[in-house]
Structures are given as C-alpha cells and as structure tokens.
Image: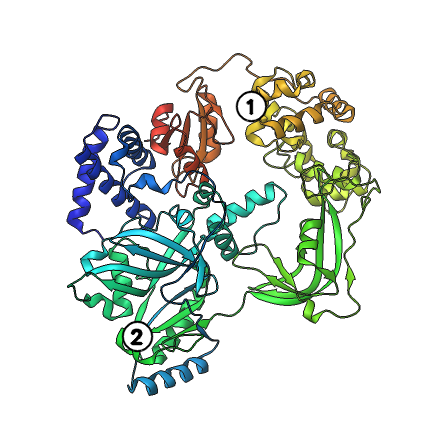
C-alpha cells in the first residue's frame, strides 16, 4: 500500500508530530495526523512490522482524541477514533447481501481435484486453466460494503442470502480499514468477502482466562471468532484481538464514466488491489498456478506446514484466476463452478463415552472427566477429556454410551464438540452428577453465581493432596524435589497429612525407600529448610486462597506487618487495599476467619516459617509511589526480573488495568490490557526501553 518514499515521508513526519504531542493543532494538521496514524495502523495490524513503539503511537492517538473533543465538527467517519463504540447493541438487524454468499464444493483428495479440473476445462473450452490457490481460513465469514471509499456496512454470512448487520462490531477490528481508496480503481460501491479469525496465541490466552473463571474453554478459534462478532458490547469485541482476511470481490459498481481497472480482471489482481488499499488479503499466501497437478502439489505441501501457521486453516481454496472465465463457468444454486475447497485431514474424530469420573481440586471444585475409547486426533491419542461442569453436560446432552465428536485443534486441549444423538442406542445412561464428594462423602454445594459444585471439607484427602502440590510449586514455596509423585507417595504412607506436615517428614524412614538415596533425601531436607525463609508474599500465594495469585499476594504482604493481621480485616477494610475487588475481598475474609486455616498458619509459624514482612520501612527509589503492570513479551528482561526492579525501586505491582495504574509496560504481542489502558487517559503506556530508563538499570 505504501511505497518506500511514502514510508520515509511518514516516518519523518511522525518524528515532527511527536515533538508537538500535547499541543494544539489546526484542522489541516489534524487531517495530516490521521493520515500518519492510519499509516502506523497499517504497519502494525496488516504488516505486523511497526515502526514506532506503542507509547509513541498512544501519544499521537491522544492528541487526536483531545483535538476532536475540542472540535467535534472536525471528526470524520474514517478517523481512527471512530472505531471506539459507545453503548450496547440491543439486537442485530438482518440485511440482504448484494450477491448471495454461496458455499464451496468440497474435495478431499487428488482424484476429486482432477475430476473438478476436467469439468472446468470442458466448460471453459481450454486445454489448461490458470488457478489461484490460497488458504481456507477457519473463521467466521463476513461481507463488507464500501461506498464512496467509506466502510458503510458489515454483515455475517447468515444463511448466505441474508446476514446479521454487525458494522459496529467489525469496526473494532483494526485490520479492517474504515476507508479505502476504491475510487482510484473507478469503483463507487463494492462488496468484498472475507473471514474473521483469532490467531492461535490469542485464542490460547483467551481460553486460559476462561479457565481461571472456572468456565469451559471454547472448542476452537472459529467458535471464538464467530461468537465474538455477535457480542452486544462492541468494546468487548475490541478486547478479543480479532483479525480479518479479505479474499474476494463479490460485486462492484463503477463511478459514472469510469472503466473497470485491469486489477479486477483476475482473482489475483483483486487480492493485490485489496492489499494495496490496506486490507489483510492473502497475497503472501496465495499462488497462481497453471494446470491442476501444480495445484495438487501446492495443497499437499501447504498441509505439511499447517501447524507452523499463526492461525487455523482447514484446507485450501482453488479458484479459476481469470474473472471472465469465472463468469463463463457460472454457478449452481449451491456453489460456484469456478472454485472448490480442498479439505485437509480432520482434526476431529468420533469416539464412545465409556464412563465419567469426578475429580476434586484443591479448592474443592468438582470436575467431571469423560473417559472415552482412546482415539488418535492430530497426532495425539486422547482418552480423557474434561467436561468442565454440570451445566456443560446438560447443554450438550451428553450421556454415557453416547457417540461423541471430539476435537483437538493445534495444541489446544481436547474438547467434546457435541454428542451424536442420532447414533444413540438404548443402553445409554444419563450422567448423574454426585450430591456428595466422591472422595470424603461430604455434601456438595454450589456457590451463588457459579457453575461449579464444591466439596466444603477442607480436610478432604483429594483437596489436601492438591493443596500440598500447590504449596510446594515453583511460584509458591519452591520446594525442589518434592514433586507430585513424591507427595502422593508420602501421603499414602501417612507421612504427609496436611501442609504443615511437610516440615515434619521422617527423613530417616525416607532414606529406606527404593530410589531415595541419602543424597536425594539430604537435598530434599535442605530445600524444605530453605523454604522456611521464603518471603511472606510467597507463603500467601502458597496458601491457595481463591482468586489470590502472585501479584495480589505481594499487595497483601505489603499491607500487613504479620500475616495474622489479616484476621482483623473486615471486607470493607480489604476493599480499601489497592487492587483488591469484592470477589477477592470476600475470599480473603472467609479464609482468615476459618479456625482451621488459622490453626494451620499458627503451626507453620511454630515450625519456623516467616510470617513477618521483611523490610517493613517503605522502600524509596526512582519508582516510589508509582504502580506498574506488564503485558506482552519483554525482550531485554524476564518478567520476574522486571517486576523485581519495580519493587526494588519503591514501585508497586498491580494485577489488572484500572484507574489506580500509573504505568502499563508493553512488550511484544500485547493483549487486551493494552486496549483497556488506552481508554483510561491517566495511564501512561510505555515500552520496555522507557521502563528500563526509569529504573536506571544499566542494560541499554
């Protein structure tokens, strides 16, 4: 889209604009600023090759926001600020596509492609056809309309004839330009088609967040993208980091007196036009090939590289490249004759649900786990799959004995997509969720507003073992040598009965166990003794209080001089602590008002563990009284080292974006925290280099 000369020009102008950031600008300068911002959005969202830091971009963006707030009449529909939507969509209106969005004919092997090519040659009366081959993106199909160079309408595929109007949501996707100079090609109105995706990394992060909330993960990126497009709050759509690939011109009308540009004469030409206008079209992924054998070879090679791609694809699409020949071939009522999909080998398989086991977690959560007939999917044999909770089982109507469709995309955990009731036999049985804990027998309860049943008995064997495993883990007390296998073994031997019993293990008896030599026992003893002097924030994290992770543990450790002080805190007091919300406050209060927990803490102190905060006097330094949060991947420092720098220099760490945050430090592949921070003017968004300079750390 941008030439080398234009790139140099915009870079030079960026430097000058950054010098004037925060100052008043004229209407002409504002228009120029918007052009520069659009250039940098293209570098970031289309080319994935930014030329300025997020902090510098934010300085320019804030200048634009402030100027438009002062001069509302200067706002244009294609301004970068107009992506941000206000309010909730109450419903989605149905609209008719200019041209029906037909399905594609599918092929699964070389013979299918050879037969399709034969028909294409016969109908076109050619001895050899030129094809354009591109990935078949596994996302949610969309249709966009631009009129007079402005994005005016976006819709879902729907039934192919009608789709739901989702223009506002699509504006949140930054790889969809709000304006594009189609008029350069003589076009007045155009309808283009594409696919909305969520890349593998963002999908994984999104599922991790769902898991933290005890919610079932989404089955695949396609579901994540499709579901996101229909979220009623556009701001939430913006947080999901969706991408859009545009790959087809379905209809256009010309400006009066203009002729169609030569780019519109071939499919490859249309892809190049879209790319040059700022769209993420598959120009890099596509290949123009004469003859079907080359097409077959390319499809096979691409499938072999499938897992290396940052996004999911489920096949390749082969299209006749010449648009005139496409018109000559025409279409059926179901699919065009000039295109076909070559489908890759399935990442799904069917199996039989043999049984369901119920596992108990360290906080008492009851998780149903499906035991299926082992089946190979995506190079891995799957035999156990989490069913998450009772609601998940009911919604999918899963029964023991059912045939089930299982999916595993990339490195995503296995997931039961659905049961297959049409294959259901008479011997199927409903899955009966237990009313009592499967380990200790106590009656289960379901907290209000949660989907998960829990065992209330903190002395339940299963919970005890899981709590010990968490207590000794790397991010907690970091007791090397006391791994899960040893913990379960020592528990069965009666040596481990609860967390404090870690510090009373019988080392003399342990040395007699097979595989436990004197050196191993001595190393374990030293690791356990060393853990007694771990700082109190690690102990707080190790206690496994619900919703309290590393960052909140550090906040609590800074708040009190002795861990037992938290017994005196009311919920109201806890809510006054920085970064502690209502759910977290309730959990902390309940933990420190449980007599069994207090006895455990007292025993740990008697056994020599550190319960007092070290360095009670406030640390002063370059970052005193400032709050920080990190997002993305740092390249010069490890995340833990960066967080230590904050604390050593008197700063504080927060676990989430809020008005209490002073600085968000942004690394590579930043997520939703960056989007949220951009909407809070008081937050300073800086890159890693700027953070290092603030600390005075000698790394640059």
Name the spot of residue 510 as percent of width and height, x first: 77, 38
- The picture places residue 51, in percent across and down from the top left corner, at 27, 42
Q: Residues within 10 Å of mark 1 (few under 14, many from 20)?
A: some
The residue lying at 79 percent from left, 54 percent from top is: 432
* Closest to the observer, 341 or 441: 341
74 versus 647 height, above or below: below
Residue 365 appears at what percent x and percent y?
A: 71, 42
Residue 492 left/right relative to 66: right
Left or right position of 311 against 127 = right
Give the quadrant of residue 416.
bottom right
Residue at label 1? 555
Residue at far right of view = 441
Between 582 and 619, the one nearer to me in the picture: 582
Label 2 neighbour load within 10 Å: few <14, some 14-19, many 20+: some
Check disc 2 and report the residue beneath it.
289
The picture places residue 551, in percent across and down from the top left corner, at 54, 29
Position of 175 relative to 539 (above/below): below
**Element under disc 2:** strand
Q: How is the image coloured?
A: rainbow
| 531 on left or right of 646 | right
The image quadrant that residue 413 belongs to is bottom right
Q: Do residues under tags 1 and 2 come within 8 Å of each other at their CB atoms?
A: no
């Amino acid at each position: 889209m941008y030439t080398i000369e234009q790139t140099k020009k915009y870079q030079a102008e960026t430097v000058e604009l950054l010098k004037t950031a925060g100052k008043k600008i004229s209407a002409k300068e504002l228009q120029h600023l918007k052009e520069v911002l659009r250039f940098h959005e293209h570098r970031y969202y289309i080319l994935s090759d930014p030329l300025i830091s997020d902090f510098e971009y934010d300085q320019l963006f804030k200048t634009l926001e402030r100027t438009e707030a002062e001069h509302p009449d200067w706002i244009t529909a294609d301004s970068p600020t107009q992506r941000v939507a206000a309010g909730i969509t109450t419903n989605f209106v149905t609209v008719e596509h200019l041209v029906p969005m037909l399905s594609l004919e599918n092929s699964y092997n070389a013979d299918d492609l050879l037969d399709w090519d034969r028909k294409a040659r016969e109908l076109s009366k050619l001895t050899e056809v030129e094809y354009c081959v591109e990935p078949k993106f596994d996302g949610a199909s969309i249709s966009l309309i631009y009129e007079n160079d402005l994005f005016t309408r976006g819709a879902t595929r729907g039934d192919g004839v009608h789709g739901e109007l989702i223009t506002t949501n699509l504006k949140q996707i930054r790889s969809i330009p709000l304006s594009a100079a189609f008029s350069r090609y003589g076009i007045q109105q155009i309808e283009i088609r594409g696919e909305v995706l969520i890349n593998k990394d963002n999908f994984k992060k999104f599922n991790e967040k769902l898991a933290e909330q005890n919610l079932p993960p989404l089955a695949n990126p396609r579901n994540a993208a499709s579901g996101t497009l229909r979220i009623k709050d556009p701001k939430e759509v913006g947080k999901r980091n969706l991408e859009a690939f545009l790959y087809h011109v379905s209809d256009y009308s010309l400006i009066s007196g203009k002729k169609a540009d030569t780019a519109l004469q071939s499919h490859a030409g249309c892809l190049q036009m879209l790319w040059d206008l700022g769209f993420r079209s598959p120009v890099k992924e596509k290949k123009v090939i004469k003859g079907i054998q080359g097409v077959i070879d390319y499809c096979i090679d691409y499938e072999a590289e499938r897992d290396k791609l940052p996004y999911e694809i489920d096949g390749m699409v082969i299209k006749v490249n010449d648009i005139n020949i496409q018109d000559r071939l025409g279409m059926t009522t179901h699919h065009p004759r000039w295109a076909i999909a070559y489908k890759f080998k399935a990442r799904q398989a069917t199996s039989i649900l043999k049984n369901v086991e119920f596992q108990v977690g360290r906080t008492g959560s009851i998780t149903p786990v499906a035991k299926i007939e082992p089946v190979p999917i995506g190079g891995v044999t799957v035999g156990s799959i989490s069913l998450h909770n009772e609601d998940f089982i009911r919604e999918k109507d899963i029964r023991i004995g059912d045939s089930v469709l299982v999916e595993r995309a990339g490195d995503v955990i296995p997931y039961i997509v659905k049961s297959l009731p049409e294959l259901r036999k008479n011997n199927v049985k409903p899955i009966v969720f237990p009313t009592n804990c499967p380990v200790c027998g106590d009656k289960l309860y379901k907290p209000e507003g949660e989907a998960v049943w829990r065992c209330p008995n903190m002395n339940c064997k299963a919970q005890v073992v899981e709590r010990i495993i968490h207590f000794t883990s790397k991010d907690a007390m970091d007791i090397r040598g006391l791994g899960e296998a040893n913990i379960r073994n020592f528990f069965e031997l009666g040596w481990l009965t609860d967390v404090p019993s870690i510090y009373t293990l019988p080392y003399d008896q342990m040395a007699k166990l097979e595989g436990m030599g004197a050196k191993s026992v001595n190393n374990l003893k030293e690791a356990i003794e060393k853990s007694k002097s771990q700082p109190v924030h690690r102990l707080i994290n190790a206690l496994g209080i619900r919703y309290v992770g590393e960052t909140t543990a550090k906040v609590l450790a800074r708040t009190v001089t002795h861990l037992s002080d938290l017994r005196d805190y009311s919920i109201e007091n806890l809510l006054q602590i920085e970064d502690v919300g209502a759910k977290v406050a309730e959990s902390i209060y309940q933990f420190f008002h449980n007599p069994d927990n207090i006895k455990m803490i007292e025993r740990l102190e008697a056994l020599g563990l550190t319960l007092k905060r070290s360095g009670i006097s406030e640390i002063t330094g370059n970052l005193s009284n400032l709050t920080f949060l990190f997002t993305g991947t740092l390249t010069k420092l490890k995340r833990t080292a960066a967080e230590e720098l904050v604390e050593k220099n008197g700063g504080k760490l927060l676990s989430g974006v809020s008005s209490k945050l002073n600085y968000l430090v942004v690394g590579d592949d930043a997520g939703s925290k960056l989007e949220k921070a951009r909407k809070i003017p008081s937050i300073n968004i800086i890159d890693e280099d700027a953070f290092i300079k603030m600390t005075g750390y000698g790394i640059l």
